[in-house]
Amino acid sequence: MMLTWRVALVAVLAVAVLTWHSNAADPFAFFDWDVSYMTASPLGVPQQVIAINKKFPGPVMNVTTNYNVVVNVLNSLDEPLLLTWDGIQMRKNCWQDGVLGTNCPIPPGWNWTYQFQVKDQIGSFFYSPSLNFQRAAGGYGGITVNNRAVILVPFGTPDGDFTLFMGDWYKKNHTDLRKLLDDGKDLGVPDGVLINGKGPYQYNTSLVPAGIDYETINVEPGKTYRFRVHNVGISTSLNFRIQGHNLLMVETEGTYTVQQNYTNLDIHVGQSYSFLVTMDQNASSDYYIVASARFVNGSSWDRVTGVGILHYSNSKGKASGPLPDPPNDQFDKTWSMNQARSIRTNTSTGAARPNPQGSFHYGSINVTHVYVLQNLPPVRINGKLRTTLNGISYVPPDTPLRLADLYDKSGVYASDFPTGPTTGPPTLGSSVINASYKGFMEIVFQNNNTIIQTYHLDGYAFFVVGMDYGVWTENSRGTYNKWDGVSRCTIQVYPGAWTAVMVSLDNVGIWNLRVENLDTWYLGQEVYVKVPDPSGYNVTEMVAPDNILYCGLLKDKQKQQVPHGSLATASSSVLASSKTLTFMLLLLALMFLP
């Protein structure tokens, strides 16, 4: 179809606007994603999963520090959709965060385009749906942010790079699981653990039926590979190990760590790690890759084990025999906590920038805000099962919080979130934590539930300064690590214990603070942290995007889309500098001028 010069000029101007909102020297990465249902049988039973471009799990987004990322998402589901980007900080741009506090959902049949920059970041992250328990059906994939070539990496270039998604899994559809929670019921024991969307290798004929597709990682003897491992499950902590091989931890959620060898590691829901693994065994047979449930009891949990295969090119046979041992005591949470304490920041190396990671002396900064966030076992509020933080079970308002602020809509949310545990009866509410730009916040997570909780903060990485059993008091600060506590965005809190983090509030916006355990998140265990722009709208914070979706009190502003069909295309990525892209479209415009 012939383009008019006016259409071509509009295209040029659109790209020009795009470049003005980002660094003109930084490349763009374009992705076109169709999010739809497909049928898969990861545990031997056909069921509905959520795929991206007909892939389950979805594609790995492979970019480099400071890239501008543009993701066009077509929602081919039968319910609203948002994708959130765990660990990507969306610097001054919470409009792209993909949660209900900042974004209206993408309606079924509609498309919406995310645009953000992976500013000053490196590391291993993942994306996933943030609504309606959809992550229990898939829709997740990896985000790999590579170092720029000019920045030294604290280890040699690996011979290959593998991404592993592991997580507990149910044979029920996510809608059925959601209904169980809505009816006040427990989800019960998961049916298994998936590794990269596949069920377990048949290591035990009584636990694993024949014919299940399992994940195989093909390697060459003597080479060293990087494994990026993500727990994308629902609620189960998993112990990860590779038979006969050490795991040299090098990075977690954007921070290069002190390099230590582990024979196994507890990875909790929502957490990401990367390891270097050297193929130094004799390949007498293949080797097991294992992700097994932790801190659980009863034979019904024996099936909650994911098993893949590490296959040397010169392997002499299939893996057989028992799985490599997990930690000695399945219930020894002290052992697990000590392991977590051993994970520290490599203070002498750079990351996204050349200056050492330890050059930010967080331990010497004055704290301006302190919040102690206490969770309890689920309770009933107005007859419904709910979870709480400081006695409040969060209910998302129909109008996103940031959108309500932009249009001066009052009464959408309250600004009275308590700084500590409350004594009154639990309530439903939409309350936010008020913070100050350039402030420094101490957050203590107090877990009074009986299961491990994993907390995640959008928009930031925080410093993990302490964890211990018992009730946190001000005297607990005497145990804090004020020098090389690991900087990350997701941290576990053991039952009957506390974890303390510190965060520099240098990113304006409204940011979701949530438990990553999908069931407790769904039932209300979240809050938002509001870091307002002190200079006023569109000074420090980025302007709202032109394609913003409207809902709730602002629904009349929304221009309707005609629901359109599935893209049904393969994952695509196009890289170009913004200057090049603008130049190309200028040429296109000139071609169609009369």
Image (tube, helix red, strand yellow):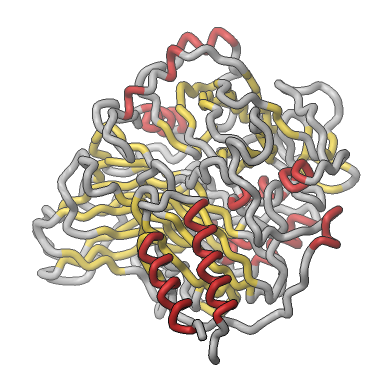
In the image: residue 237, left or right of residue 96: left
In this rendering, does residue 133 appear at all?
Answer: no
- The total of numbered circles placed on residues is 0
Q: Residue at x 62, y 30 (%)?
A: 447
In this rendering, does residue 33 appear at all?
Answer: yes
Tell me residue 335's x, y (percent): 39, 30
Tell me residue 244's x, y (percent): 20, 51
Farthest residue toward the right? Answer: 382
Q: Residue at x 39, y 67 (%)?
A: 583
Q: Quadrant of residue 369?
A: top right
The residue nearer to you, when weighing 526 against 25, is 25
Q: Residue at x 46, y 74 (%)?
A: 55
The residue nearer to you, when weighing 154 against 94, is 94
Tell me residue 242's x, y (percent): 27, 53
Farthest residue toward the front? Answer: 594
In the displayed structure, would residue 289 be above or below residue 265? Answer: below
Q: Quadrant of residue 311?
A: bottom left
Tell me residue 441's x, y (percent): 57, 22
In the image: residue 3, left or right of residue 377: left
In the displayed structure, would residue 13 be above or below residue 384? Answer: below
The residue nearer to you, when weighing 186 against 62, is 62
Q: Residue at x 44, y 71 (%)?
A: 586
